[in-house]
Amino acid sequence: TLIYIYIFIDVFFFCFFFLQLRFLSLSSLSFNNMSSSIITRLLIASCTICILLPHNVWGRMAFEKLTDYDFAGTTYYSVKNLSLYECQGWCREEADCQAAAFSFVVNPLSPTQETQCQLQNDSSAHNPSAAPQRSANMYYMVKLQLRSENVCHRPWSFERVPNKVIRGSDNALIYTSTKEACLSACLNEKRFVCRSVEYDYNSMKCVLSDSDRRSGGQFVQLVEAQGTDYFENLCLKPQQACKATRNFANARVGVSEEKVAQFVGLHYYTDKELQVTSESACRLACEIESEFLCRSFLYLGQPQGSQYNCRLYHLDHKTLPDGPSTYLNHERPLIDHGEPIGQYFENVCDKSSSSGTGLNTSAMDKLDTLPISFDATEDPTLNITRNDVNCDKTGTCYDVSVHCKDTRIAVQVRTNKPFNGRIYALGRSETCNIDVINSDSFRLDLTMAGQDCNTQSVTGVYSNTVVLQHHSVVMTKADKIYKVKCTYDMSSKNITFGMMPIRDPEMIHINSSPEAPPPRIRILDTRQREVETVRIGDRLNFRIEIPEDTPYGIFARSCVAMAKDARTSFKIIDDDGCPTDPTIFPGFTADGNALQSTYEAFRFTESYGVIFQCNVKYCLGPCEPAVCEWNMESFESLGRRRRRRSVEGNDTKEADEDMNISQEILVLDFGDEKREFFKADPSTDFAKDKTVTIIEPCPTKTSVLALAVTCALMILLYISTLFIYYMKKWLQPHKIAA
């Protein structure tokens, strides 16, 4: 909108200037020269200010890439034998290009791969309901506009995998109205390194994670999820590619290394070729590559003449849709061209959940980890030293914690020195295990359902036995056994380690409690439709919701309404859970597991956008309402937690869990044109940008200032032109009649 206003003003003054020239019938050559000079300066000034307008009015251009997938689209230009990066560069430069489809034909007899680049001005990739088609040797690149200063200068910023998610690795959950806003949030994330994103087009849920497909442990496996796409951040620096140490090793895909290397040399598109003196030099080139995120390399042996012997790739077997099975179905070429097969190495991340070596964890791990206390049941004088129950005779000490989730039990282990061995569920060493290689932090997920991990459940209490084994095959007395238990009891927050001298090695008990489900805010109109834009005085239903199938209740306190710029705020619910002014925002009432309050829309004087933020806490079962007073009257509001009596005494306990949630709504004045933005099926309205949670819809102060300077400059130039003309006419000597 700002650009359109600027162009309109520019054209208006330009046309008005020439109309004045024609009206005054100016024909003087000197004035024509003067006017040409002024026009030239006007155009230069206009173009300069237009260039200096903030680039965030448009957003930054970026690309997402899909491997071996293709979307339907309208091709307006097709060319052969371009490189992958030339194809992407053409689409970047073409304003009409919305997507680029790059494919190549495998020909073992040809020294170069025959390629085809198709530029599309319309693509179904922007439609959430469109299903991509599998296509071998295809890279599909979709143009995006991301509002982030951290968009990298690489060919593509994200790798997209349709209808896939990673379970149980969420670090942050937000709601955005577009996929682009979700990806921008990942690039803008400061609390942790955002390595992957999941976006649900139906619920508009955006999940950020510091894990990706290459993070160690079985808890990062991709699973099917219709309507949700998985994205990997490819703007990471090489040292950020892994949460722990980044190494390179032979691909473990169930086939011989020679067969894998032969497939890679034939079917992988080479991103960069160079000549090196050794395999370690080729490895180093991949490690420090900055133009793209290097995932693997192929070393072809000692250099011969001027031939390249090191190939770098942005691919690995995890990038391919079929994963390891891709190599199983591959047949050797009928004709051998005589070139060396080489050695293929892939990027391998240590099986650690930390963001680096050592005992540092991500922000989410700190939130999820429950406090640990040690209880020596045999020797009351036992100290927590290398001689305690959590250390072995080798001097290795184990710090074990439990994360109780909705569908799994996550056992997190940290050690004071690198550990080599296995961690597995007792009796399920083949189906529920993780191999640990030289790592000081690792994690095992125990599924609650099925027989893979054999987790036992009795009246809501889930238990299992975990073995920490040093040797890959045999079990010794130095190994550790932990009894893990999760219960749905918010009053129990401790994890207790106790010795059970009934077997060798010792068994240690761990008890924990599950995390509560995340709440969300919804604002509904009188017809129970979720709204984002309303008018002042509209009757709205403010709801804080959690899933119905949980044993928890919620209460809200410290709710604040803030202006869009956060300069003005108004507390609507105080710290005790009572409304500060029930005439503006009444107290909460219960509606099942949800809280709701019916109020009339209001806004702040200087801002149309109103952001609501509440502190939400949990109870086991329904929460006790707060008793509030207003105008000498008492009433109840669900803003105070129910206190739970301890078994031993009369003092009370309160749970420590709380969560801040927020929601934004746009409130128009009475005279503004009514525009309704109801959340509809994204498949029927996928082209509209309805983001209000991430993207700033109003022009910035810098943009407004630039527009004001432009207008002032144009007016000044026009006035100067007229002034010079009349001064010239006034100073010109008049002819005296004979």
Image (cartoon, rainbow, N blue to C red):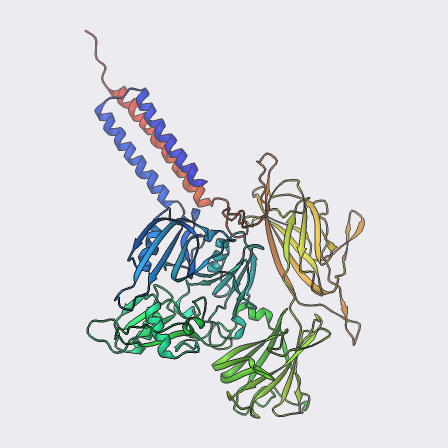
Q: Nearer the viewer, residue 694 or 280?
A: 280
Q: Nearer the viewer, residue 143 or 108?
A: 108
Q: Is residue 436 above or below residue 513?
A: below
Residue 294, how many percent across, how many down? 37, 68
In the picture, residue 239 is in which quadrant?
bottom left
Q: Nearer the viewer, residue 556 or 258?
A: 258
Q: Is residue 19 left or right of residue 737?
A: right
- Quadrant where the C terminus sits is top left
Q: Is residue 337 visible?
A: yes
Q: Is residue 332 above or below residue 465?
A: above
Residue 318, how many percent across, how many down? 44, 70
In the picture, residue 202 is in which quadrant?
bottom right
Q: Residue furthest top?
A: 738
Residue beneath the point at 46% across and 63% down: 232
Residue 373, how many percent across, how many down? 64, 80
Residue 542, how many percent across, how many down? 67, 50
